[in-house]
Amino acid sequence: MKKRWHIFLGVLFSLVAILVLFQGLEVDEFASEISKANYWSLIPFIILETLSLWARGMRWRVLLEEKLGATRLFWITNISYYLSNILPLRIGELGRVYLVTRKSEVTGMQALSTALLERMLDVVTVFVMLFLVLPLIPAHGLVTSMSYLIVGLVIVLIVSLFVIASKRKTVAKVMGLMTQRLGTRIGGVINDAFDKFFESIDIVRGRRVVLAGLWCIIVWIFSVLATYYLLIGFVPELQLYDATFVTSLLALGIALPSVPASVGIWEASAVAALAVLGVNREVALAFAIVFHVIVFVKMSILGIIGLHLEEESFSDIVTHAKRLIGSMRNQDEKG
């Protein structure tokens, strides 16, 4: 039932986004913007986007304690995005958990934990980027103040979680005392969620957290530069900080429920970000669609190549991924 609701919400969000995007669109102007864009910018865009994926593989390698090579993790990352682009429920995340545990010493829990950590690092980095560029973005005072408040609160919350993790035993005792009054069932659920969450970030300590953080910065530098080079192919007057703003809002937007490949949500996020920068809808939508199509095609090609190199079929990965999650759930229930 939960899966059905997630799919329903994804379809609903995507449909609404598409309807809003194309309502009242000047089709001739939109077509003109696509045709007159500077497509030479695609060369640095594709190179930088690919380097961003390579850096993601390097970051994951650090989190996995160098148990796999960077090249293999690069291809597994591409397979993951490829699967997520064509299947619902972000099945690509489960697929990469299976692939990374295959022919390696990595356990399923370690793979899942590091995947969660990657998402947390991405969220922190994206909000920090927003925090840094907001003063340079033209907006009303109230909007800017509210944005700073939200970004600041999120950064404080996430940093606090890492600080709490370093004092896990003490916090666990306090949590145990607090949940005693909630009853065995509710208290048990809260404590179990608490334990699972902090188990996932226990592996990141000392040198590894610094290295993972550095690779995360590199990931997003490549991503922002890629966005910038494509963006100036449509709107030459925009600056690097504008591209940082667009990249940040795009990253946050596609986290919403949607159909596979974030169709509609991706374009709506990019158009909304560019609207704040004063770019008209036809230009913004032309940029967003070209951006999305190129990324989709590139990830599909790299994902298919990755499947060939891993000697795995599409259906086998999906099947094994579901089995892996099922077995881990059974282990949790027994524990």
Image: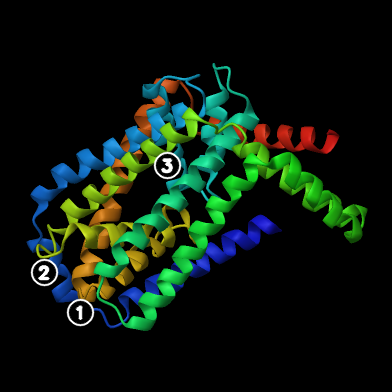
Q: What amino acid type should be assigned to the residue bearing mark 3? A: Tyr
Q: Earlier in the sequence, mark 3 or mark 2?
A: 2
The quadrant of the rendering that contains the C terminus is top right
Rounded to the nearest angstrom, the CA distance separating label 3 from label 2 is: 31 Å
Q: Indicate the position of residue 285 as horizontal and vertical percent values.
A: 25, 67
Q: What amino acid type should be assigned to the residue bearing mark 2? A: Ser
Mark 2 neighbour class, 10 Å CA radius: few under 14, some 14 to 19, many 20 or more: some
Report the residue at 20% width, 76% height from top: 280
Left or right, 276 with respect to 108, comes to: left
Q: Indicate the position of residue 186 as horizontal and vertical percent values.
A: 85, 57
Rounded to the nearest angstrom, the CA distance separating label 1 from label 3 is: 33 Å
Report the residue at 78% width, 32% height from top: 331
Q: Nearer the viewer, mark 3 or mark 2?
A: 3
The quadrant of the rendering that contains the N terminus is bottom right
Mark 1 neighbour class, 10 Å CA radius: few under 14, some 14 to 19, many 20 or more: few
Q: Does the image show residue 257?
A: no
Q: Image quarter for residue 26?
A: bottom left
Quickly name the residue at label 1.
26
Q: Indicate the position of residue 220 as horizontal and vertical percent values.
A: 33, 46
Q: Secondary structure at mark 2?
A: helix
Q: Secondary structure at mark 3?
A: helix
Left or right, 83 with respect to 25, comes to: right
Rounded to the nearest angstrom, the CA distance separating label 1 from label 2 is: 10 Å
Q: Image quarter for residue 253?
A: bottom left
Q: What amino acid type should be assigned to the residue bearing mark 1? A: Glu
Quickly name the residue at label 2.
32
Say if 238 sits above or below 214 in the image: below
Quickly name the residue at label 3.
81
